[in-house]
Image: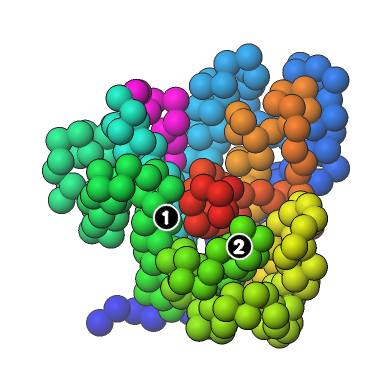
Amino acid sequence: MTKKIKDTDYLAVSARVRAMENSLLTRERMEQVLEARTDEEAVKILQEGGYPELDPARPEAMDAALSQVREATLADLSDGIPDARYLDIFKLKYDYHNVKALLKAEAMGTDAAHMLMDMGRVPVAELKAAMESGHLEELPPCLAAAAEEARSVLNTTRDPQLSDMTLDRWCYREMLEAAETTGSAFLQGYVQVQIDAANLRSLVRTLRMGKNADFLRGVLFDGGDVDKAAILRVSADGGAGLAELYAPTTLAEAGAAGADILKSGAMTEFEKLCDDAVSGYLSAAQFVPFGEAPLIGYLAARETEYTNLRPGHLSGSLRGGGQGQDTGAGQNGLRGDLPHGDAGQGYGGAAGSLQG
């Protein structure tokens, strides 16, 4: 019989997390990085925050350094964590990202090396070998099924967005199943609010595109807290009742903003409010003295920080464009999205034009 994990089993790791939170980049420090006038100045600020020497002129080296820091963090936490599945849930999204990259490269006859991220459960070399040989049974079951279905979709439709959407659906499914098996209501809620945010984005985007409810049905994800049937009714009614549907939820402000831009207007504030809803959920972790919640909040904040620092995401002198944002996972930390293109704050959402 499996021993039931109690909150008190997290006493040691919770204390470690509280200490490690102090090394998260604050909003102020991230803004200093973004506003740095030279690459050298930005790198110096990051090193003062505990990062190793980074070379912004060599994106692949910078990526490798960030991956090493991330792996060291996970290794440090794995020693005292009662349930390793809490770490896996922050790794599996990279597996799905890598499958996307490999399938697209395969379809285009190009090399996926520059798109791959060796930060998942399955080492990139092993994943690449399994995909190329067709021996998908060597992969975790959900990932294998997802890869097989996504490849079939891509070969049949030649539409990478539909293939991506298939992988997104499987990723959310596996994340939710993993969360449920831990028995952690906080972790389940974290995955569900990400699904709800992705579905809200799809609802608003499809309405703005003039797509009908049948189209929306094909891009909504299962497992969220907001009823899919209710979302589809809003879609069928041309957006009427959108704000009211989300008013009782964590996404109340995002829902109201989405209702305001159904016909026209910039998406920037709406997108930010969707992110803020996930951050707001995570912010509850700072009021929990011990248990899995502080660990989840910290891991989410760290993932977002790495995402913001990765080549292609960080702005200022190192990248150009973009901003860091609060995670809500404590007083420190930043927020951002990681893949479906990027997997940080949440896995992402529907493919291409709907969730980009």
| Marker disc for residue 210 | 2
The answer to whether residue 118 is magenta is yes
Image-quadrant location for residue 283: bottom right
Above/below status of 288 relative to 211: below
Q: Nearer the viewer, residue 350 or 262?
A: 262
Secondary structure of the residue carrying tag 1 is helix
Q: Residue at x 49, y 51 (%)?
A: 351
Foreground disc of the pair 1, 2: 2
Does the rendering let one see residue 20?
no
Q: Amino acid at mark 1?
A: Met
Does the rendering let one see residue 60?
yes
Above/below status of 91 relative to 169: above
The magenta stretch spans which residues?
Answer: 110-119
| Marker disc for residue 165 | 1
Q: Residue at x 25, y 48 (%)?
A: 156
| Marker disc for residue 9 | none
Q: Residue at x 48, y 40 (%)?
A: 71
Residue 112 screen position, x and y as percent = 37, 28
